[in-house]
Image: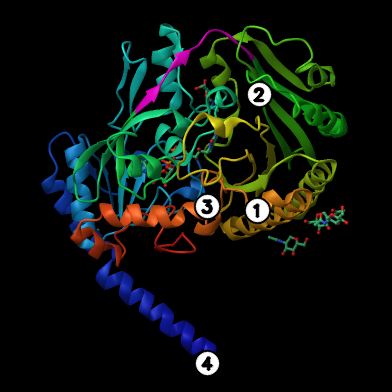
Amino acid sequence: MDRLFTTVLLLGAAFTHGATLHGPRGFNSTCTQIAQAVSSASTVSWPSSDLYNQDIAHWSLAGIEASACSVEPGTPSDVGKILQIVGANRTPFAVKGGGHATNPGFSSTTGVQIAMSKFSDVKYNAQTQTVDVGAGLVWEKVYEVLEPLGRNVVGGRTTGVGVAGFTLGGGYSWLTNQYGLSSDNVAAFELVLPSGQVKSVTQSSNPDLFFALRGGYNNFGIVTKFTLKTYPQGQVWGGQLTIGGDHLTEFHTALAKFSDNTDPKAQLLAPVIYVQAFGGPIVNLLLFYDGPTPPAGIFDDFLAIPNLAKDISTRSFLSIVGASMANTTEGSRDIFEFVPNTKYTPQFFQAVVNESLFWGQRLSNTSSTTSTFVYEPFLPTIFNHASASAYPFNRARAFLPSNLNFVWTSSADDLILQDAIRQSGKRLAEVAANDSADAATASIYGNYALFGTSVQRLYGSNLPRLRAIKATIRSPEYHESLLGAGRFECVDLDYSPLYTHYH
Ligand SMILES: Cc1cc2nc3c(=O)[nH]c(=O)nc-3n(C[C@H](O)[C@H](O)[C@H](O)COP(=O)(O)OP(=O)(O)OC[C@H]3O[C@@H](n4cnc5c(N)ncnc54)[C@H](O)[C@@H]3O)c2cc1C
Ligand SMILES: *[C@@H]1O[C@H](CO)[C@@H](O)[C@H](O)[C@H]1NC(C)=O
Ligand SMILES: *[C@@H]1O[C@H](CO)[C@@H](O)[C@H](O)[C@H]1NC(C)=O
Ligand SMILES: *[C@@H]1O[C@H](CO)[C@@H](O)[C@H](O)[C@H]1NC(C)=O
Ligand SMILES: *[C@@H]1O[C@H](CO)[C@@H](O)[C@H](O)[C@H]1NC(C)=O
Ligand SMILES: *[C@@H]1O[C@H](CO)[C@@H](O)[C@H](O)[C@H]1NC(C)=O
């Protein structure tokens, strides 16, 4: 009785809160104000228009929220006006780059959806060997411009992934063994502060913000442009290799050996995918070598395993990025979870196989289509390429950014699948921590972490400095707005657990 009463009260409070302060009508008047304030370079759209649908779209259908309106700002100064209005009205908002975040509320909102798609310029500067990249781009658009120039950037490994979220969170690339994370290769950010001020942030102009933006996502403002270092790029070797579930042991033996490889040009991505349609797992490897032919030995053990499909050749960088099947789950519901790993052990391999079979079978009576564990071996030296940054908070050693990725089709199963991936992630993290105490204190990679991950695990010893930096960028009115709903979402330093639903 008591509990029922409390529930009714809470529901009532939430409803009143929603309807009067932040309800659709309140949000809509913020939208109208934005439409009146911005220049003709920007576009505001209302529900059900094509542009609105495009603006709120996400790679994972489970990542979408129906916003009151959407806005595509066309200039940094309009971004500033939008931030001032949502701040003053305490209207929740979200910033979307490529829309590949799978956690609802990270780049989606029931308030004002800001879509950065108009920031789409790519401009190479031969003198500085850097490239200016708009915050609304996906990586393959950048590669398309650089490839004919024989240059490349440290960016996404598959099609469709946005430059903005990837770089602001860290960014594990095919070139990371050689040059570090994407965020380690930023020369400058063009940042719009919550006050509306537009700032160019570099290591020398503003060391604190430069530190904070490299891993701090949307906590410090909206980035409109990235200036990225470039490197020479020629032909590469690799592509897709699919191995059946009856060869998991040989695959794991080859993977264990590959993990000791020291050639920074060699990399791979190894998803173990339980496919409901097959009733079992397969391995869908992506192999990569930064050169026309890999030295003998590095990938031979994988290539010797009987395969179901193989698309491996000497090719352009763009072609290898297009070769992945990462966009085939587009249009499904999808969620990620991070598993901190310092090394792969036989116990860990066993646990992955067990988890794959366990959840594959357990979820067979749901709309689950695939449940995947992804091995991402990197060299222990990948964090030696740059100075301190928000992510990772510990550069003393590399952590393998292992991750889980579950896919399903029915929204009725959202909670079941989110709970399943949380449980599986927890179980594998326990095994990893049992293998190495360091795994228990690893920097969690926000771009793979499930919502609800504690801010302490994401930023660790960096947290006090990040909070202090965040305090300096708030204008008085923005500080006020932070008390309400009009604050940056995603990894919010002011709240723990970080993630808040605005349903
Ligand atoms: C198919 C697929 C492949 C992937 N491959 C890799 C990989 O190889 N390596 C890797 O490291 N990660 C990978 N990821 C994870 C990827 O890094 C994250 O999903 C990343 O956030 C995507 O960036 P986005 O711009 O597309 O995301 P969005 O969903 O648009 O944004 C993600 C976060 O960044 C914030 N943000 C976006 N734009 C701005 C801006 N202009 N200013 C301030 N904040 C902003 C958003 O508010 C949100 O919090 C992959 C994800 C998918 C789905
Ligand atoms: C929101 O405002 C727009 C334009 O001001 C108007 O056309 C629309 O009907 C309003 N929507 C709601 C739900 O009030
Ligand atoms: C995936 O991306 C590639 C490269 O951009 C494209 O050619 C292909 O049609 C896409 N596939 C799907 C299913 O969307
Ligand atoms: C297999 O996984 C399930 C689910 O995490 C767990 O309960 C069980 O103990 C595991 N079995 C082994 C042998 O590891
Ligand atoms: C699926 O089966 C499990 C038992 O394995 C059960 O607990 C669960 O409720 C079932 N889920 C659905 C959606 O039927
Ligand atoms: C941890 O390791 C010990 C010893 O190898 C083993 O007995 C135990 O089952 C392991 N626990 C987990 C959670 O893997």
**Residues rendered magenta in the picture:** 227-237
Q: Main secondary structure of the magenta part?
A: strand
Q: Amino acid at mark 2?
A: Gln
Residue at label 1? 421
Residue 458 is marked as 3
Q: Is mark 4 within 8 Å of ligand 5?
A: no
- Which residue is at the front of the view, 404 or 331? 404
Of the numbered discs 1 and 3, the one sitting upstream in the chain is 1
Residue 492 appears in the rendering: no
Q: Quadrant of residue 53 in the image?
A: top left
Of the numbered discs 1 and 2, the one sitting upstream in the chain is 2
Of the numbered discs 3 and 2, the one sitting upstream in the chain is 2
- Which residue is at the front of the view, 211 or 83? 211
- Say if 131 sits above or below 351 in the image: above
Cα distance, mark 3 to mark 2?
25 Å
Cα distance, mark 1 to mark 4?
33 Å
Q: Quadrant of residue 420 in the image?
A: bottom right
User: SS of the residue at dot 4?
Assistant: helix
Residue 2 is marked as 4
Q: Amino acid at mark 3?
A: Leu
Return the x and y of residue 121 as percentages of the image width and height.
29, 23
Residue drawn 40% across the image and 22% down it: 229
